[in-house]
Image (cartoon, rainbow, N blue to C red):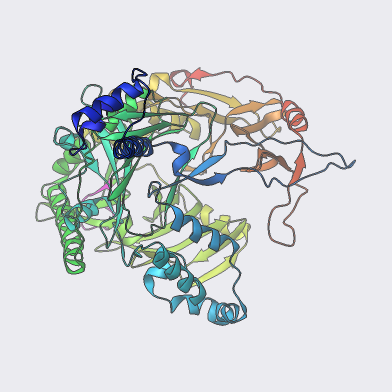
Amino acid sequence: MTRMYLLDAIGDVRGDFLLEVRQLREGRTKKGLRPRRKILLIAAVIALSLLLVGCAVAYVLRLRDLTLGTISRENVPTYYDEEGNLIPTEASAAPRSIVSLQGTNQQAYAEWSEFRKSYQPDGTAAAQLETSKGASAEALPENFRDIYSCYTSEMVATLQNIAEKYGLNLLKKEYACAYDYEADVLLQSLHLDGVVKADWAGRCQYLHGYFFNNGSFSLPMELTAEESGETVFAEMDYVRKDCLYPYTTTVAMTQTLREWNYTTRDGMALLLVLDGENGHIFADRADAFFHIYVDASRREMQPEDLKRIAECFDYAVAPQTPSGAEVTQFFAQAQKDYEASQESRQQALYSGGYGAYVAQRLERADSPYRRDNMLYSLLDLNGDGNEELIDYQALQILTLKDGRCTAYFDSLRDAPGVSGLFYFCQDGTVLIRGVFDDSYWYYRPGADGLELIQAVDEKLGSWTLYREPKRLEGERITEPEEKQAITKEEAYAIIDSYSVRDVGIQSMKRFGEPLKTYPYRDENAVFIAKMLDKYENSEDFVYTLEDLRGNGSQVLIVRIPYVADWEGNVREGSPQIYGFRNGIRGTVFSFDYLCEGGILCQCEDDYYEFYRMEGDDFVSIEKLFVDENGYWLRKTPGQDLNTSGRLDYQVITREQAQEIIASYPETGMNWKPFALYPLQ
């Protein structure tokens, strides 16, 4: 806005006065007395000009104007070594600014936040808290308890007073869209078509978010660039200014932080921020404030990238106040539509015979790795003369009825909480060996499905015997009531009492070809031969044999890169140790490098843990890492749980940590292609 424009905007100022003011500013006016009326009018014009210019400056957003405080490492605890010397430390992460989501209209939140930090319940409130373990909080109005985290009536009263003081409304209801298929509920309830411009609508996938009774909302989404096809995650917060909003965001105060003002092509003034970790877009409207978080973790984002993303959003969106009855209806319809789509998907999957099922499974594979990992067997499990199809990846068994597939066993339905690998025993028993835990679930094939015989499960060194399956109650998996503690020896006596057999296996992409068996005495050879047959890029798989136990026995270590997407991008796998017991695969152990003496190291950034292999177990012998305060901590096997139930770690200096890490020197491994392994 130019100076003359500001003056011309005042319609009742005569032109000669405008000219004099302009000459005065340009230093070309002649000195002399002016009538009092003229002087006062000129003063008023100048004052109004300065006021308008000041307003323009106020609407130029700056990060400092939005900041409520800083999360930093100011309260770092002090540690001393055994000789009483201070152990030096440094922050492991940059401090973060707490940023308001209501723009500069932040006084109410700041006052409420300060109250919560310093709040100590008085005698009455404390007595309420002690009764029934928080029953008093349950009695509070839902919005105060769940939205504003109030837990006493004192907090409720204080919050109400703060809102009244600043003339703000309190949010009354929060609606959470827990699943991605409920994303439309948010848009429908707020009467929005979307939050991106029309040319981006087809390249935006909305995910689950949440919204409030006044129309404020938070909506995550994935944006796909038309040129590169790259997908970026973003999340828009839209906050009405007439409410006391309970949430904030944070910005990392890194040395590379950049902020600048940017005006979109349609005239919206923005504040753009790149903090070295993520991108942030801020927009201030008279009635609402926008914050858009942009994930920059995949690659370093440049200012031009953030500008392009900023251009895709519609900053004129006007969400309506949701109707509670409509919201309930929209949620119910979303659930109904999702269940119908799932049913349709399952019907399409099962509508034909095994060949049609396999074809659809292959069509839905999201990468070559997933496709190559789809294996099946055909086996008459219950002796009715019909072969069942075993889908190893889906952990599912199908049978045919009237020419259509039907689920004979579905692990999600029939064995909730069980995830693993199928094995088939000599006596007809079906075994599911846990992948993520040390568990063994044994089933007897029945006329219409598998029936649990027993299971043995190890947790934290203790073994349990189950005689009944886990149950799914709502969304919660309940543990079997009929269970018995057993020893490790008793558990392995049960495991070893079953003998697995080779029933033949084939890749789904070669459906119809004869099933392959692997009649090798060497269990490592069986595993490697299957991998060579299964994966198209198996020529890149390598192995080595190492004496990790120190007793002359050789342990199989493999490194398997896998093709992660259809564009052919390959992810290098970490070294992994595979072990087998009577034809059953044991727990796979991943590590980063091998140290002298057969020690295995897992490491990432400032975290190091060293293991020794004892029997079939991997025992941690040393752990070093940097905690949230920037201190190096060490744990050795001699340190046990202290009285508070927490692991008692020893604080050490950075130099000591480096010395300990260096005491485990890395040694090389003699990698060979899978194709060179002797199959026998």
Quarter containing the N terminus: top left
Range drawn in magenta: 380-390
Residue at 45% in and 37% down? 63
Given residues 77 and 533, the one toward you in this image is 77
> Percent x, y for residue 451?
34, 64
Q: How many marks?
A: 0
Is 40 contained in the magenta span?
A: no
- Left or right of 199 on screen, residue 32: right
Residue 373 shows in this picture: no
Residue at 29% in and 40% down? 37
> Percent x, y for residue 228?
25, 22
Given residues 528 and 339, the one toward you in this image is 339
> Percent x, y for residue 478?
43, 67
**Could you say which quadrant of the image residue 365 lies in?**
top left
Given residues 401 and 165, the one toward you in this image is 165
Is 385 contained in the magenta span?
A: yes
- Left or right of 129 on screen, residue 509: left
- Left or right of 588 on screen, residue 625: right
Given residues 344 and 238, the one toward you in this image is 238
Residue 287 shows in this picture: yes
> Percent x, y for residue 357?
17, 44
- Left or right of 634 on screen, residue 275: left
Residue at 52% in and 54% down? 495
**Could you say which quadrant of the image residue 231 lies in?**
top left
Q: Main secondary structure of the magenta part?
A: loop
Is residue 576 depicted above or below 147 in this figure? Answer: above
